[in-house]
Amino acid sequence: MKFDYIYCPTQEQVRKHIQNCEGKHTQQVAYSTFHDSLTQICFGCRRIRSNMLKLVK
């Protein structure tokens, strides 16, 4: 399964995507206190949305 990475400048934008997918798609959400970032992995949209600018591989 391949996912697209989408950068959202604010955590509020990530939260809006989480709410839009709520109840429609299976998703996993994580908050990092170290990076102060919110990340959503949506399996229905096949997208990773985060306010982390750089994706660590």
Image (cartoon, grey):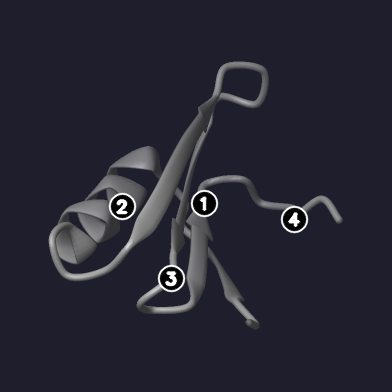
Q: For the point 36% across and 77% down, which residue is it?
A: 44
Q: Is residue 53 toward the left or the right of residue 29 in the image?
A: right
Q: Nearer the viewer, mark 3 or mark 2?
A: 3
The image shows residue 6 at horizontal and vertical percentages of 53, 68
- Residue shown at 17%/53% (left/top)? 19
Q: Earlier in the sequence, mark 4 or mark 2?
A: 2
Query: Between marks 4 and 2, how big is the CA–CA gap?
Result: 17 Å
Which residue is under mark 4?
55
Q: Give the Cα separation between the discs numbered 3 and 1.
A: 15 Å
Q: Which quarter of the figure has residue 5? A: bottom right
At label 2, counting other C-alpha atoms closer than 10 Å, the crowd grade (few under 14, some 14-19, many 20 or more) is some
Q: Amino acid at mark 1?
A: Ser
Which secondary structure, mark 2? helix
- Of the numbered discs 3 and 1, the one sitting upstream in the chain is 3
Q: Amino acid at mark 3?
A: Phe
**Which residue is depicted at the point 66% across and 51% down?**
53
Disc 1: which residue = 50
Left or right, 43 with reference to 37: left
Identify the residue position indicated by label 3 in the image: 43
Rendered image: mark on residue 13: 2
Residue beneath the point at 86% across and 56% down: 57
As measured in the structure, the alpha-carbon distance from the residue carrying label 3 to the one carrying label 2 is 18 Å
Kindly check if marks 4 and 1 are in contact, taking CB atoms under 8 A apart as contact: yes
